[in-house]
Amino acid sequence: MKATRKLMALAALAAALSARAETITVEAESFADWGGWVNDTQFMDQMGSPYLLAHGLGKPVDDAKTAFTAKGGKYNVWVRTKNWTSHWHPGVGAGTFNLIVNGTKLPNLLGCQGKGEWLWVKADDVELKAGENTLALHDLDGFDGRVDAVCFSTEARPKPIVDEFESRKTGFRRQTYADNPKAQPKFDLCVVGGGIAGICAAVSAARLGLSVALVHDRPVLGGNNSSEVRVHLGAWQNVPPYPRLGDVLAEFGPRRGGNAEGAANYEDGKKLAVVEAEKNISLFLDEHVNGVRTNGTGRIVSVRSVNTRTGVATWYEAANFVDCTGDGNLGFLAGADFRVGRESKGETNEPSAPASADSITMGASVQWNAGKASGDASFPFRPWMLSAIGEASCSPHLKGDWWWEAGLGRDQIAEGEYIRDYGLLVAYSNWAFVKNSYSKKEAFADKELKWVAYNAGRRESRRLLGDFILDQNHLHNRDFQEDGTCATTWTIDLHLPKSVRESKFEGEPYQANSFQEKIWPYPVPYRCLYSRNVPNLFMAGRDISVTHVALGTTRLMRTHGMMGEVVGMAASICKKRGCDPRDVYKSHLAELKGLMERGVGKGGRNPKQDYNTGNSLDASLGVQYGEGTKGRIQ
């Protein structure tokens, strides 16, 4: 009897403790005031969440602040963060910060634990008030400290922390969602990715009468041509066989060229204005697509996005979808056939292909610029910076252009954060050297870093496979296909890392060479622009159906924009004829050609865009067909 009463008492005590237990998780991206921190969404698919980044270029940023409610009492505080420089420097490195709770700074230094992995760190114990409490992230050095979430719990090791050690780190998985959401927006076409290809696809389809969802995971449109990445447009537009392809792009293409220039050069607002002017486009910014729902035949029914600020999930249903993500994310989720890396010479017979297939890709650029300082221009060397950058290997310039390219040969998706972080590390290390130790450092005495990209500009990752795979031989032989669309005009431009001899740098390469081969303009076959095994999936951009070598020419953004225009036209035929993308080629190709001949531009005068058109074997391009660069008058 006593034993029974004792067990009952213990059970009652456990129930009481459980009733009083509380765990509160505050997502960093949901803070009411980000202060000087920025929301980094690039690596959600790998580490599981957006996170706040203290990107201050070596100057501490203002506190991020928010409020939350609690029952009150003593709580354990956990923070999910990482020691990002520990890949290259042991111990305390860049990106340290403190938490401030109810106005009191907690003493434990954060951002310096672990060996480069995301992990939950026990920060401290605090007393919380019953009701509203305040929380702030206090950056200490301006060198990219990062916070995913803060957890307050009355338990020593709360279940969410234990679970999320496993669940968050797995992030994105290739899977479908079989459930049937109750309510979701329905469209004729859903375009995932708001770079140049995605904008053009959405506008083209909308002007031809389709209802379009344009879903983009950043707050601004433009992708690599936005103020966040700052890569200028390249290649020719408005050239045969369909000179009207490129008219949409001409309406919002920036007036000025140049990489790593001031933010205004990239005219983010102009891109937004063109999209918002289309009544048939519903624009969804800050929405990251990470799930699909398919039927039994592999057809995409709807896609799922997560808001990168609130975490709220939304489903979008459509008849057809376009993957303009660059990385082929939507196709990957839907089970589309894809390829990564270089094909072998035995497989493709391409002159420039390697003897053996491999997973090597071109890299990602973390560009930067510097200028006259507005105040204190000092920039000290820190112990975590690369000491291998010296007199012979430094870059004594005021800009890090396209050749600042990291991660060549690494997995651009799985190792994306590592690659971006290495790009940041070399930019800071190089600037510290030229400011403090370079033999001509006086030239930099009054200069400061003005901008360093935290969004890396990728060149290559997944390529989704269509009914036709364009390769180098098609380009060489001018083997034009009956379904040719927009012309690719850039050189076959492939990048490899600079050698130690070239760079005088013995660490991991961070600068690249470009190996270029001129070509005649080649119309990209329509069959490269839809998936061979997902029946209602188009693609436009660098994820189309080409070999690694052929990607060297098709990866330029003006070419991407024209691809987007073509896909929008094909989607309109799909709606009109009740057919799939493949059927446009099989049964309605003449109709597509008619749309490409007419174009969907407004016909007004556009600013000159005569920059970065590249070198072609057709020397007459600029003379005969340069309407897109001269500005067109209908």
Image: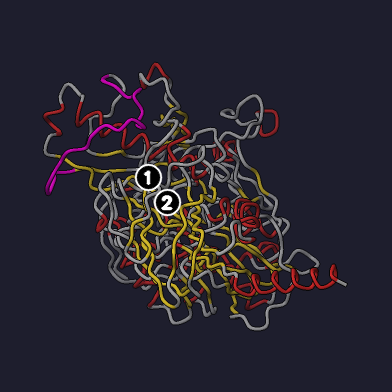
Q: Is residue 375 a member of the stretch shown in magenta?
A: yes
Few, some or many C-alpha atoms within 10 Å of disc 2 (few <14, some 14-19, many ≥20)? many
Task: Tell me the quarter of the picture where residue 159 sits.
Answer: bottom right
Give the SS element for disc 1. loop
Q: Which residues are magenta?
A: 371-391
Quarter holding the N terminus? bottom right
**Where residue 31 sits in the image (x, y, percent)?**
41, 67
Residue 239: x and y in percent read 42, 54
Percent x, y for residue 265? 26, 56
Relative depth, front residue between 360 and 549 = 360
> Are the residues at dot 2 and dot 1 in contact (C-beta closer than 8 Å)?
yes
Q: Residue at x 66, y 31 (%)?
A: 357
Q: Is residue 387 left or right of residue 592?
A: left
Please identify the quadrant where the C terminus is shown.
bottom left
Residue that carries the numbered disc 2 in the rendered image: 146
Query: How far is mark 2 from mark 1, CA to CA?
Result: 7 Å
Which residue of the protein is positioned furthest toward the right in this rendering?
1
Q: Nearer the viewer, residue 448 or 168?
A: 168
The amino acid pointed to by label 2 is Arg
Q: Which mark is residue 68?
A: none
Query: Label 1 is placed on what type of residue?
Result: Gly
Compare residues 469 and 331 and report the one nearer the observer.
331
Q: Which mark is residue 95?
A: 1
Q: Is residue 399 left or right of residue 353?
A: left
- In reply to whether residue 199 is colored magenta, the answer given is no
| 413 lies left or right of 97 | right
